[in-house]
Image: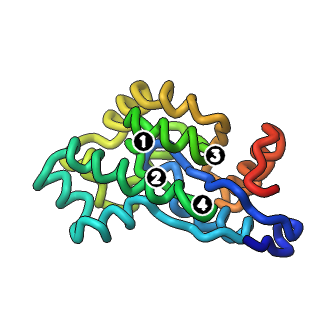
Amino acid sequence: MEGDAKNGGRPHRRTIVLVGLMGVGKTTVGRRLAQRLGLPFVDADAEIERAAGMTIADIFARFGEAHFRDGERRVIARLVDGSPKVVATGGGAFVNDGTRALILAKAIAVWLDADIDTLVERVGRRNHRPLLTGKDPGEVLAELAAKRNPIYAQAPIRVESRPAPHDATVTAILAALKAHEVQPCA
């Protein structure tokens, strides 16, 4: 795959997978990171919805979380194989043992982390998250962070997603990739 001027003309070799809690900015940051690297961007949740022919909320309601996680794992397995890209995952994807093993073996995992207040403000902008339906977002996010952050910490790279322009987070990811000598491109 040919590189472009934005990445020094170097070809890309590995998929970058963004993991973290809902509202951390995986999709928005992922799109901008892909653009900066000259790679395609894929939102795993959108791919799951396309494959299932229904929304994630509908999958949860009709079949339950276990069924959703199985489909999610299969979709992510397909996404980390093949040509390099930037993939944004759903908040629970990396928590699944099989999905996490696939990501760690075949891609560069980047944990986007944010404080609970920032996450609550961000998730409040849209009402499409099944795990928050009818619940206090702050309480749910704090509980999820307590359970999931130790698992997200298995990603080789952690970048804080602050209430700042998304390009600042993209720049931080690129710096972290370089500092950790994890090169998305040759």
- For the point 29% across and 53% down, the residue is 71
- Gap in angstroms between the C-alphas marked 1 and 4: 16 Å
Secondary structure of residue under mark 1? helix
Q: Earlier in the sequence, mark 3 or mark 1?
A: 1
Q: Quarter holding the C terminus?
A: bottom right
Q: Which residue is mark 3?
A: 108
Identified by mark 1, the residue type is Thr
Question: What SS does tag 2 mark?
Answer: loop
- Please state the horizontal and vertical placement of residue 142, each as a whole percent of the image: 40, 31
Sequence-earlier tag: 1 or 2: 2
Task: Tell me the CA gap for discs 1 and 2.
Answer: 10 Å
Please identify the quarter of the rendering in which residue 57 is found.
bottom left
Q: CA distance from mark 3 to mark 4?
A: 9 Å
**Residue nearer the viewer, 170 or 126:** 170
The residue that label 4 is drawn on is 86
Count of picture labels = 4
What residue occupies the far right of the structure in this picture?
Answer: 8
